[in-house]
Image (cartoon, rainbow, N blue to C red):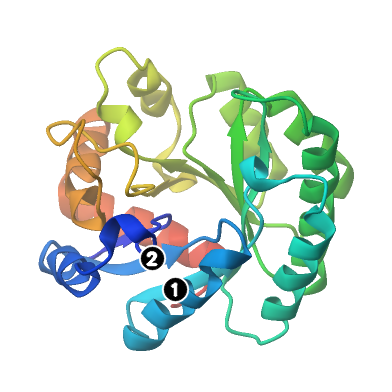
Amino acid sequence: MIFTDTHTHLYVSEFNGEKDEIIRRALDKGVEKMILPGINSSYIPAQKELAERFPENCFVAFGLHPSDVKNDFGKELETVKENLQNGNAVAVGEIGIDLYWDKTFAENQKTAFKKQVILAKEFDLPVIIHVREAFEEVFEIIDKLNDGKLTGIFHSFTGTLEQANKIIAYGGFKIGINGIVTFKNSGLEKTVKEIDLRHLVTETDSPYLSPVPKRGKRNESAHLIYIAEKIAEIKNISLNELADATNKNAEEIFGRL
């Protein structure tokens, strides 16, 4: 039984001194493939170092996180493009729009997101999209840029069934489900129940959003098992079926890693 964690920030300082152990724990739980989405340029060396040491397990994506978009985001996008040109990235991400905490750079976020989607099309890569309090803004951009070839993941999905159906209708996107699905009052369980399994992928977003029973503690890729168990329970299927289906879905987005 093998799982893919399609979104984990194992390279951040929260794991310093423990990264090898963290990855070994993930492998022990059957989490053999881990996608490492970018945040900003300062993290790129750590991303690359981890992927170089675990080339069969860790795979990098480069992008500017919406919460890191400021007035000088142009320089960051140049760095993203430079690293995409090296040919080692499996996606452009984590990109998107986040209007939850601060709307100061909302227009810059929209511009940065659009430019990075265009970069993904240029390099024929999928996108990993972060959306928080900004579905309509993200949909507006994807509506214009989606050409049937654009693919990716709407990561850490917390939207409605209607929003999920719109994502599915694009044709090339999957929906990332993480520990939020285990939270009692999230409402996500009801939505996931209505979404066909062929549209879902699993993720942790570690070190954030630890699932029950680890909620409140630092998250890690090994905790994907709790998320998988919850989705399998919702879908009334075995863990093996869940692993097979979500791995196939991840392969549709990233190819065979």
Does residue 79 appear anywhere in the picture? yes
In this image, 184 relative to 103: left or right?
A: left
Q: Secondary structure at mark 2?
A: loop
Q: Can you identify the residue that label 1 sits on?
A: 46
Q: Quadrant of residue 3?
A: bottom left
**Where residue 121 sits: x, y (%)?**
79, 65
**Which amino acid, by three-letter code, is at mark 1?**
Ala
Amino acid residing under circle 2: Tyr
Residue at point 24%, 41% (across, down): 227
Other residues around mark 1 within 10 Å, as few (<14) / some (14–19) / many (≥20): some
Q: Position of residue 2 (x, y in %)?
A: 22, 65
Residue at position x 24%, y 69% from top? 19
Q: Which is nearer the N-term, disc 2 or disc 1?
A: 2
Q: Which mark is residue 11?
A: 2
| Residue 136 as seen in the image, left or right of residue 195 | right
In this picture, is 189 found above or below 173?
A: above
Residue found at the far top of this picture: 185
Reply above or below: 204 against 194.
below
Question: Could you tell me residue 213's position as x and y percent?
Answer: 12, 32
Pick the residue in front: 233 or 65: 65
> 45 above or below 39?
below
Do we see residue 124 in this rendering? no
Disc on res. 189: none
Who is closer to the viewer here, 9 or 256? 9
Instruction: Check the picture and name the quadrant holding the N terminus.
Output: bottom left
Where, by quadrant of the figure, is residue 214 drawn? Answer: top left
Q: The C terminus appears in which quarter of the rendering?
A: bottom left
Q: Which residue sits at x=64%, y=85%?
A: 87
Q: In the image shown, does 28 or 111 lie closer to the viewer?
A: 111
Total marks in image: 2
